[in-house]
Image (spheres, grey):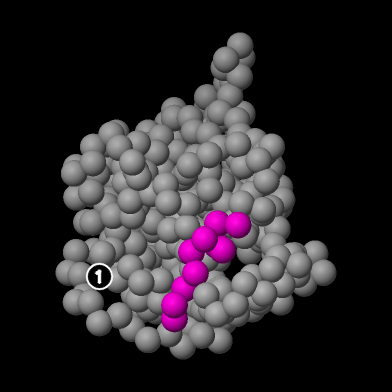
Amino acid sequence: MPAPIVLDSDPGIDDAVALQYLLGTGLWDLRAYTTVGGNVPAAQTFRNGRALARAFGIDRDVPVHRGAGRPLTRLPYAAAGEFHGPAGLGAEELSDSTAPEQTESSAQAMLRLSREHEGELTVCATGPLTNVALALSEDPGFARRVKRLVFMGGAAEVPGNITPVAEFNAWADPDAADLVVSSGIPYTMVGLDATHGWRFHAEDLRTLEEAGQGMALTSRLMSWYLNAYDPASGCPLHDPLAVGVCADESFVTAADGTVVVETASELTRGKTVFIPYDADYPRPYYSESPLVSARTEHRGRIALGTGPRDFAKDFVNTLLKRPVAA
Ligand SMILES: [Ca+2]
């Protein structure tokens, strides 16, 4: 039976195809599509979320919620239009859904669903972690009611992509990321260590294009994204991989460890400091700083590279199962 999941996104091109991939797996009962500011401002990600729900034919069944309009303690999200286009979805101008607008915020919807599906709800976050942090702030019990949070973000042992040391989502709201990983919520971090390893190439684009009208929107989105990166070396499948890992960790290699997110420095803002877990040698790091050591109490699963199962292939095959009428 499909398992309950919330997809929390800042669409965003790879968010958009992550949603399509999720629907294509047939593994999930998508209870809500919650949006958050990130790649583009929150009003636009909400509009994009509704338009995608309509395009994918789910807007009568899956509520789309409006998310945080700004990071926890910082000025509004900087746009990433370079990769996602001026309005976040390449050159697409999709029609809005005619479904009534939800009055619940993204964080409120997550909290409600965590009670309705206590111990069973997976949360997949593919944008800044602001909504998840707001849910945890309002009710810390969210951390134990959620089965697992899988988020795309961070860079454990590799360079960043928005600064030399920080990945975009972690950088966009580092306070939220730090709050989440120190909350005790069972989490898996799917960062650049793994996402840069699973790439979508020009031949994958040809496969989608040759599949006809049902893949036309997907092909245009992936064409934009591929060209924003480098068609010769392919584009990373950041957000789709996080969705993939929700169902099967073997798309990545992962280890237990602790993540602490840098929130104080502007130079290294959003750096995800990774402390591997070694049962035989509990590390004394940060013992002189109670404030830091308090943030190292909880462990998560950290993706450190690609896994044995081929995600790039699964991504394309799964999209082909979920043609889009729009
Ligand atoms: Ca995203």
* x then y, percent, for residue 96: 33, 83
Quarter containing the C terminus: bottom left
* Residue pictured at 56% horizontal, 46% vertical: 190
Q: Magenta stretch mostly in which secondary structure?
A: loop
Quarter containing the N terminus: top left
Relative to 157, is 153 above or below? below
Q: Is residue 51 visible?
A: yes
Relative to 10, is 134 above or below? above
* Residue pictured at 41% horizontal, 35% vertical: 186
- Helix, strand or loop at label 1? It is loop
Q: Is residue 140 visible?
A: no
Q: Tell me, yes or no, whether the highlighted magenta stretch contains residue 323.
A: yes
**Which range of residues does the magenta coloring cover?**
317-326
Report the amino acid beneath label 1.
Answer: Arg
268 displayed left or right of 325: right
Which picture quadrant has residue 149?
top left
Q: Nearer the viewer, residue 4 or 89?
A: 4
Relative to 266, is 225 above or below? below
Q: Nearer the viewer, residue 270 or 249?
A: 249
For label 1, the residue is 60
161 displayed left or right of 7: right
* x then y, percent, for residue 261: 52, 46
* Residue pictured at 42% horizontal, 47% vertical: 27
Q: Tell me, yes or no, whether the highlighted magenta stretch contains residue 234.
A: no
Which picture quadrant has residue 312?
bottom right
* x then y, percent, for residue 84: 57, 76
Residue at disc 1, CB closer than 8 Å to ligand 1: no
Which picture quadrant has residue 270?
bottom right
